Amino acid sequence: MKRKVLFVFLLAVFGVLFFNYKVEAKSFEEFYNDYASMNFNQKVNVLHNSQETGNKFYYNTLDDNGKEVYASFVPMMMGGYPFEAVFEGLSGDKAQAMADSSGKAWRAFNFDHPEYFWFNNAVNISVSGTVISATLTVTPGIEDGYMSGATFNQALLNEDLTHILARRAYLKQEADQLQNEYQKLRYLYTWLIQNNEYDTDFSSAFAHNPSGALIKSDFGKDGSLYEPVCEAYAEAFQMLANYCNIPVITTIGQAYGSGGWENHAWSHAFMIDKWYFTDVTFGDPTGSHLDPDYVDYDYFLAAPSNKHVINDEAYLPSPLSDTAFDPNLLNDFYLETQENYVYNGHPIKGYEELYILANPDAALTISYFDSNNILLGEIPSAIGSYTVRARGALGSGFEALSINFNFSILAPEHNTVIYYDKDGNVLASIPYNFGDAIPNYEAPHVSGYKFVSWNYITEEYNVYAHPIYQKLVITFEDSEGNSIDYDFTDVAALYESDLLNGVEKDPGYLIMGWEINGELLTEDSQITDDVTLKPLVKKINYSIDGMTKKGENVFVGSVFKSEDIIGKIVVAFRLNGKMSLVHLLLQQSSQ
């Protein structure tokens, strides 16, 4: 019987990329131009933050003092420059104990992180001070090729960083198109061999670091000699594999070759549930009788070699397979996609059938792990990188087999930003492309408050925007600039109050209302920022229809008769440039 398992987006082991859009492949030159536009610090940050598998194999071999020193190297690497790790205020015993572990700590860091290719295994360690207060200083070494005498050659490193970041990104792009981790690792092994030639005369200053194997003279180096020896092969293989999320470590010891027993570096790679011996250098044999594209796969995921002896067996990974890897093991798992995944802002849904061909009725357990290899309690749906681990018995007489499915949940092609008012009601839902700037939206006016900013909260595929308001600070002054005590709530309530009744004015002037910067505040006005309100006072300029003004309060005309009448005089008040007609009833005496 086939066992159905609910999965999220699988990218490996007969996986294909189930997207409703396609990302076009980029050339090496395009990757190169992308990184060339960055400055030195940006390149180092990309190198640091994008190494998907943070290998800690050698870290786990250290004592507590060594781990403490090792941890201090991590933030200092972010600068990219030569540095000193300084530990102050230690007791003499503590400083000495950490000093005894510092050399091993640096070498462990260097082996775990070959991406920092401009550093080497050399280290200077010193202790100074007293028994009570001592200082430990640890100074890692720089590869000779990146030093100009005693000066750090940042310009050359900056150029080489561009090459290595581009090469790494391009090779991962190509490897990600393959079906499973075995094929990806074989592709990287093959590329390193077919694109390098062993530095038999040891003339390259970069032969012992990954740049010797990753920077090729056919692109931008003007024929400069960047050729590798075993250490460069092994560290470049580890660096590329780790970037493709495949665990690989570098091992050092002695190997027997054409010159007898010599110092050597090779690799161990993790596949399914065991570590396998691999030697890229031995896979690239020299000799005029060989085709330049010849690759010896006898040293790829092979059984332990009797031509290789590790310096310290404490550094052998476990469990270490005593046989070569059988790629047919991968065919024992069958994956069938029943529906594609569609990114629509909801958790991804889809069913796959997964069972073991050799034993279809075997119980199968599924576990999910995040990018830090921490076991999750449920199927993940948030954006990130994950691993699905399927484990089951192959059948009678066979050991249990487990296999990892590496997958990523990426952002949808389109996202939505949802804007709310202060009461939580939706104002607008605006689509936008992932990676673009979030589209803005004008916040509604709230009487008595001013808008400060939007509070953007990102959850999976959507952005939720809530407005932040602050209470307005409204102050009042009379015509003389004296403070008036009033608790403002809104404009309408202000004009309903008798606050203006107590404001003094000169004869011949009218109080029109409250003003902001000389403009009359009306009941329809909106105050959106802190402000001081003052009375708007205007002098009255008037005329009387049908009469001629002869002087202040003296008008001459023929409006009035000799008998008592009640006449109507139209007085025009010109206030702030606008005409307002007022009808006055006057009683005129005949005398």
Image (cartoon, rainbow, N blue to C red):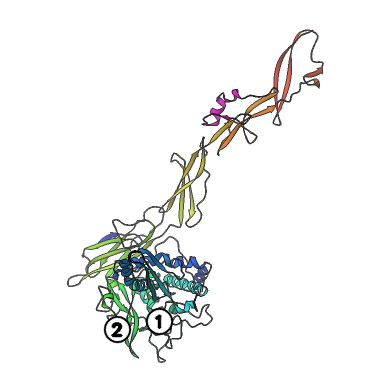
- The residue lying at 42 percent from left, 77 percent from top is 210
Could you say which is closer to the camera, residue 135 or residue 340?
A: 135
Is 581 rendered above or below residue 309? above
Is 561 rendered above or below residue 472? above
- In this orientation, does residue 565 appear? yes
- Magenta residues span 483-505
- The residue lying at 49 percent from left, 65 percent from top is 42
Could you say which is closer to the camera, residue 139 or residue 302?
A: 139
Could you say which is closer to the camera, residue 61 or residue 444?
A: 61
* Helix, strand or loop at mark 1: helix
Which of the labelled discs sits on residue 308, or is there none? 2
Image quarter of residue 314: bottom left
Q: Tags 2 and 1 in contact by the CB under 8 Å rule?
A: no
- In this orientation, does residue 187 appear? no
From the image, which quarter does the N terminus lie in?
bottom left
Is 66 rendered above or below residue 412? below
Q: CA distance from mark 2 to mark 1?
A: 20 Å
Residue 241 location in percent, x, y?
37, 72
Residue 107 location in percent, x, y?
35, 74
* Helix, strand or loop at mark 2: strand
Disc with the residue nearer the chain's start (2 vs 1):
1
Image quarter of residue 578: top right
* Residue beneath disc 1: 193
Query: Hey, which residue is sitting farthest bottom in the picture?
Result: 289
Question: Is residue 45 on the magenta stretch?
Answer: no
Q: Amino acid at mark 2?
A: His
Image quarter of residue 288: bottom left
Question: Is residue 493 on the magenta stretch?
Answer: yes
From the image, which quarter does the C terminus lie in?
top right
